[in-house]
DNA sequence: GGTTATATATCGCTC
DNA sequence: GAGCGATGTATAACC
């Protein structure tokens, strides 16, 4: 798992080590040491000298972690060019990207530890409880939203943006359903309102159009706003979320 | 920098190593090996056996990285309880969290390498080009948006959220300004429309209220929607983004 | 604690 | 390539 390791290297040795393993793309490349990081692109940042962990993945993504939080201090999702060099006696890693145009530079100001780790084989990843799954369940069982509901379409494109579920109720009125996998806020209410407006405009004033926000919960301000706009809320739950249920059974159900 | 290292440990040794350094909170703790990860909480997931890098920070945050992308395969922002144990002959790290209630479990299915890294001292972090900075600049120099504009308030709360800039134009009309640090899409248009509606409702029908979306750029569909709703777009640029300008001068300007 | 808004969001999908 | 929306978003700010 530990393919190669370099302890307290001088700048030239570190640059050589980095370039060697950046070429190979054999696995994860990391350096833990005192560093200074600059970023130029969508914004501009400077992380002053401190202790950081640099992580470079085989896909060319770069991230620099400090001692706190899930989010890296600096990062680069995918790099077009990635190389190390000694500049003014300091080893510098430069990560460039074209779209958008941005540059991340890591200056290794003190020796630390550099390693190449054999992390390559990715396992299958299964996720349950997404909005897409909720949509599929409700499309097949629309009575969970309301009795007599008939689903006409899913992800219906209206102007710009897609309506999660487009349906008709027992009385023949059109129903726009906006789904949220978690507690819905005012943004969801507005999204629903926008779709309802769009459909009303397209259908003309003759046809009645209802708007339903379907989610496990809704914030109090959102509910107020929802009712004020003549829209409705329906509580829907994910089916497989109870923790006591065996994971495999739930994931493969 | 490399405080402690364990190569190809058996489950008991790995569990002991993890618990020792989880107590100490001395720096970053990491394990690179074949693992299987389960998550139960806001959703439910299973990362099947593969090669991963586990990273635990002194603040108790946990992340598991695969060979691709900036985003971890699994993570836990802050943990209330964190401990390792041998279960059925396998070392398992369990990371719990109360709000929201979720559990991350990492099963180390094959020996690898465990390390404690001395990453503790965080450097100062400076960021330029945020929306907050743009707001400050425009609040002081509203003529960059429009001649004759007078800013009345910033981050004005109007029930449905906060208005970035609340102003009055040369003709005495109220102006709602929504800022975006990057290219604005339809979501920004909706946000602006929401605020304009709220202010019009509060002020009554007597007073004219304008809505301006101020951003470096706007997507074509968003611009169409904007004009359709009687709202306006004004191009504003960040001042310090040119890359040729020295970083320090820009950051400390 | 609850809610809202930002982010160098990242990521994946569709047009 | 551009735009749009979901994300176990994370994270900070404000009520």
Image: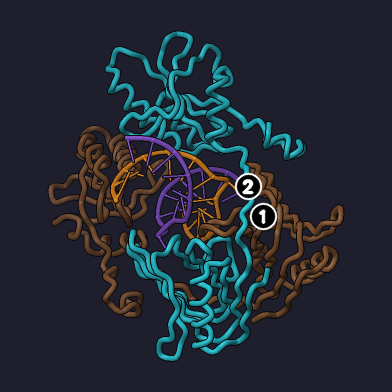
Chain colours: A brown, B cyan, C orange, D purple
Q: Are marks 1 and 2 in contact (CB under 8 Å)?
A: yes
Subunit that carries the residue with mark 2:
B
* Quarter where residue A130 is shown: bottom left
User: In the rendered picture of this protein, how many numbered marks are placed on residues?
Assistant: 2
Quadrant of residue B118 within the rendered picture: bottom right
Between marks 1 and 2, how big is the CA–CA gap?
8 Å
Question: Residue A90: x, y in percent?
Answer: 82, 57
Q: Is residue A38 left or right of residue D12?
A: right
User: Which class describes the residues within 10 Å of circle 1: few (<14), some (14-19), or many (20+)?
Assistant: many
Report the residue marked by disc 1: A50
* Residue under the image location 60 percent in, 87 percent down: B8
Closer to the camera, C7 or B83?
A: B83
When the figure is inspected, residue B112 is found, relative to residue B151, above or below; the finding is below
Q: Is residue A12 left or right of residue B98?
A: right
Q: Which residue is mark 2?
A: B124
Chain identity of mark 1: A
Q: Position of residue B28 (x, y in %)?
A: 58, 67
Q: Position of residue A230 (x, y in %)?
A: 20, 37
A40 to the left or right of B131: right
Please report the residue visible at 30 percent of the width from the left and 39 percent of the height from the top. A193
The residue lying at 53 percent from left, 73 percent from top is B21
**For the view shown, which residue lies furthest in the top direction?**
B171
Q: A37 or A168, which is in the foreground?
A: A37
């Amino acid at each position: 798992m530990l393919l190669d390791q370099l302890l307290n290297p001088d700048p030239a040795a570190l640059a050589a080590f980095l370039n060697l393993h950046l070429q190979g793309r054999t696995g994860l490349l990391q350096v833990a040491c005192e560093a200074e990081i600059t970023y130029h692109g969508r914004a501009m940042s400077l992380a002053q000298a401190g202790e950081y962990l640099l992580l470079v993945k085989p896909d060319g993504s770069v991230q620099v972690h400090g001692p706190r939080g899930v989010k890296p201090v600096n990062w680069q999702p995918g790099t077009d060019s990635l190389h190390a060099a000694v500049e003014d006696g300091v080893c510098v890693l430069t990560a460039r990207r074209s779209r958008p145009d941005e540059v991340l530079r890591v200056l290794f100001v003190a020796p630390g530890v550099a390693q190449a780790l054999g992390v390559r084989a990715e396992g299958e990843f299964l996720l349950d409880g997404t909005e897409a799954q909720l949509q599929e369940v409700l499309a097949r069982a629309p009575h969970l939203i309301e009795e007599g509901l008939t689903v006409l379409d899913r992800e219906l494109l209206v102007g710009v943006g897609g309506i999660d579920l487009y349906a008709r109720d027992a009385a023949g009125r059109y129903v726009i359903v906006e789904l949220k996998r978690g507690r819905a806020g005012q943004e969801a209410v507005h999204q629903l309102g926008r779709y309802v407006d769009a459909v009303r405009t397209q259908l003309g004033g003759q046809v009645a159009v209802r708007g339903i926000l379907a989610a496990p919960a809704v914030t109090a301000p959102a509910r107020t706003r929802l009712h004020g706009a003549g829209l409705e809320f329906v509580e829907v739950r994910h089916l497989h979320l109870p923790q006591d249920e065996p994971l495999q059974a739930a994931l493969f159900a």
